[in-house]
Image: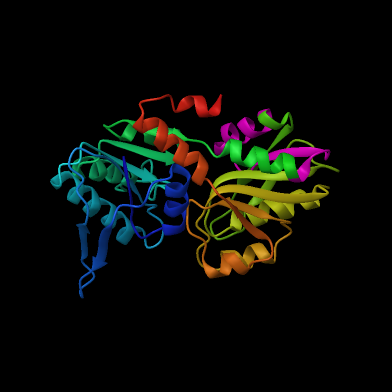
Amino acid sequence: MKILACNSNRPLAEAMAAYLNLPLTKASIRRFSDMEVFVEIQENVRGEDVFVIQSTSYPANDNLMELLVCIDALKRGSARRITAVMPYFGYARQDHKSGPRTPISAKLVANLIARAGADRVLTIDLHAGQIQGFFDIPLDHLYGAPVFAKDIKEHYDNQRLMIISPDVGGVVRARAIAKRLDADLAIIDKRREQAGVSEVMNIIGDVKDRSCILIDDIVDSAGTLCNAAEALMKAGATAVSAYVTHGVLSGGAVARVSASPLNTLVTTDSIMATEAVRVSHNIKQLTVAPLMAEAISRISTESSVSSLFD
C-alpha cells in the first residue's frame, strides 16, 4: 500500500500517513509557467495499492485537475489499484438540475474521476446520499457523526441538549447524531418571502431553555447558520453551537461567524484551515485523520468499512 498526497490538504495527508505508519510516496506535483499541472511519481508503483489524498476545495478546479493528473500518472505507472481519497468532494452541491439548461456537475466530476483511471473512491459526508450512485466504480462513504458525537459528549454532557437541522434536507444527518446522544431533534424551516429578502425562519420544535446544536454538512458563506442561530436565540434557546463537516468558509464567512450568536462553530479538517479560521476565537477543527486512515487500512486488507459505524 502507498499513500500519495496532492497539495490541497497536506497536513491531513501527513496525519493519515502517520496513523498508518507509512511514509508519503515521493512525488513532484507542480505547475508550469502557464499554470498547467505536472505530476511526476518518484517511486515505483507497479502492482501497488495506491491511495491518492486530495480534497477538491478552493481552488476547486485546480485541485480537481491535480487529482485527475495524479490518477493518470499512477495508471500509466501500472499501479494495481487506485483509490481517490476525497475528504471533501467539490461540486457536490450541483447534484440535480436546479433549473432549465443547468448542469449536474457532481455527475460530471464522478465521470471524470472514473475515466481518469480511479478504481474506487473514499469520501466523507457527501452533500446528498444519491451522489454515491453517480459513480460507476465502488464508493465508500464515511460519516462524521461518531467524531461529532464524541466531542459533543465531552463538552455538553449533562446539558438539556436539542439537536437542530438547519433545513428539511438535513434531517437524516441531524437525527443520526440525536440518536447517538439520546437527544431531542428540532428542524428549521427556512423560506424567502421574495427575492433578495432575508430568509424567514420557522422552528419546528420547542427550543426554549435548551442548549441547541446545529448539524450540517457544508458551511460556505455561513449565512444560513448565523440566521438560524439568531432565530434560535429569539425562540428562547440558552446557547447555540454548530457542528459542520466541511468548513468551506468563503468570503466574509469567518467574520460573519465571529459576529454571530454562535458560541462555537466546529468543523473537521477535511478542508485545510485558512489563517482566518486558525485565529478565530469561536471556530475550531476536529481531525478525521484516524477515521479516514482506518478506512484506508480496511480497504487495503479487504475488511469491512461499514463496521466502523456499528
Query: Residue drawn 60% across and 59% down?
Result: 197
Q: Residue 174 colored magenta? A: yes
**What residue range appears in magenta?**
155-179
Tell me: 120 left or right of 286.
Answer: left
Front-lying residue, 305 or 245: 305
Image quadrant in which the N terminus is located: top left
Could you tell me residue 285's position as x and y percent? Answer: 59, 54
Tell me: 25 left or right of 93.
Answer: left
Could you tell me residue 181's position as x and y percent? Answer: 71, 32
Tell me: 207 left or right of 6.
Answer: right
Front-lying residue, 271 or 262: 271
Q: Residue furthest right?
A: 209
Res 124 visible: no
Query: Residue drawn 40% across and 47% down?
Result: 89
Query: 10 above or below 128?
Result: below
Q: Residue 265 colored magenta? A: no
